[in-house]
Image (spheres, rainbow, N blue to C red):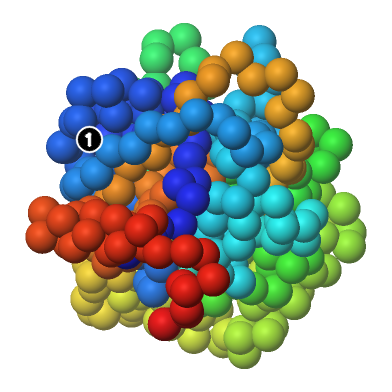
Amino acid sequence: AYITNAVKCVSGTAHLYTRAGPVRLNWIVKNQWTGEVLSVDPNSSELVWKKVIGWHRSRRDRPLMKMSFIGGKKNCNGVVGVGLTDNHPVLTADGWKFVRDLSKDDVVATGTVRPGLRTEQLIRGSLLGDGHITKRGGLSEGHGPRQTAYVHLKAKMLGPLGVRESPVLPGQCYRGWRYHVKPSPYFKSLRTKWYPKGKKVFPSDELEDLNLFGLAIWYLDDGSWRLKRGHGIETDIPEVSIALGDITPREAKLSAQAFNRLGFSTYVIHQKIWRLKFRYRRAIEFLKAIAHLVPPGMRYKLPPTCRSVKFRPAEFQPELKATDWAQVKVTKVKAPLQRLVYCVDVADTHNFVTSGGVVHNCRPPKNRKPERAELKADRRVARGFASKPLKEIRPV
C-alpha cells in the first residue's frame, strides 16, 4: 500500500521569491508554475535558486499558525509574516523544527542575505567611519569626488546585499558619490545596537570583533597622516590620527583598545573632538600592515615609504550569499479567511523562502506518487482484505 504523511501546507497569500520578484503561492500552485524560487542549502546556508517540481492544495483541517520576525515590517494586518499548519517544519539554527515547537530562543533562517566575515568587517569599519544605518534599516555612506572609486569598491563588495549607487545631489553638504544598501533584518538588528537612543555609539562587542581589515576601512574613512615636526625640523616619522568624533570618553578608550589588541600602540586625545593617535613608530607599522588593503584611489592616505606595497583587489571581492537568522514570533490564527492551504516541492534543497522564514517542502525528500502498476497492486490487496472477515487479517 502507498502511505504518505499528512501534507504540511502554507497559506495561499504567502509570497515566494522568484527571479522575477515575489509571487503568491496560490498562483504558483494553480498554474503549476515551473520556474525557480529562492531556497537555502541546509548544509552551507547559501542562498540558491531551485526549480519548483510539485504542487499541492488541501483543505485547512489543521491549526494554522502565523510566523513573523520580531521587529519585522508592518502592514495594515500587523507584522508581515506567513501562515503555516502547526506541523510544518521550519529551518532553524538547530535544524528543522515544527512551527508549533518553536521557542523564543530559536533563530530561524530568514532567506535574506547575511554578510560574510570580510563583509561584516567592511560594515563595522564603515559604521565607525562615515557609514550610517537608516531608520528603515539600510546602510548608506557617501564620500567626496576624490573617493568615488573607493565608494564603487565598497558597493561592489556589498553587492550581494542589494546596493544602488547615486551621485550626491547639488545643494547637499558636498559633491561626490553615495551608495545605499537596501533594508534587511540584519541591518535592523544592527541599528538597535549602534543607535540605541537615536544617536550613533561605538558598541564594545563590535570593537572587540574588529580585525585588520576592519581597522583599515576605519582609517580610510576617517584617518590621515602628516610628517612630524619638532623644533622647526621635519622628520621622516609620519604622525597618524583617526577622527573619532563626538563620542564618550569610555568609547574613545575602547577605540584605542581595538588597535592595542592587534599590537598597534595608540592613545586618544581630545582636540575639539576625540582623536586616536599612534605612539612612536607604531604609526608606520600600522600603515605598512594595511597598505595592501588601500585601493589606488586612496593611496594618498599612505606616506611615500608605504606606497610600494601593492594593492590586493581579491580582498574586496564579493562573498557567497548566505542566509541571515532572526528570532520569530508565533501566534495562532483564530479566524483564517482561506479554507485552502497550499505547498510546493522544490528540487534538491526541498525548501523555499517566504516572508516569514525558510520552510520545508510539504513532502519529505524521495516521497513520490505511486506508479500505475503499484496502484493496481494496491487495489487487489484492498479487495482481498475486504473479502475476508476482520479476525482473519493478520499483520505482516
Which residue type carries mark 1?
Answer: Arg
Q: Residue at x 23, y 70 (%)?
A: 314
Of residue 123 and residue 389, the one placed in the foreground of this image is 389
Quarter of the picture holding the C terminus: bottom left
Q: Position of residue 177 (x, y in %)?
A: 35, 31
Q: Nearer the viewer, residue 166 or 331?
A: 331
Q: Based on the displayed image, in which of its 4 quarters is residue 167 positioned?
A: top left
Q: Quadrant of the N terminus?
A: bottom left
Residue in the picture at 82% in, 60% down: 251
Q: Dividing the picture into quarters, in which one does residue 17 lie?
A: top left
* 73 up-or-down from 224: above or below: above
Q: Residue at x 38, y 56 (%)?
A: 386
Instruction: Specify the farthest residue to the right.
Output: 249
Depicted 273 relative to depicted 251: above or below: above
Residue 198: % across, % down: 79, 33
Q: Is residue 233 visible?
A: no
**Which residue was labeled with disc 1?**
19
Q: Left or right: where does residue 178 sit relative to residue 261?
A: left
Which residue is at the front of the view, 317 or 58?
58
Q: Position of residue 49 (x, y in %)?
A: 24, 50
Residue 224 placement (x, y as % from top left): 51, 58
Q: Is residue 281 above or below residue 23?
A: below
288 with respect to 10 (left or right): left
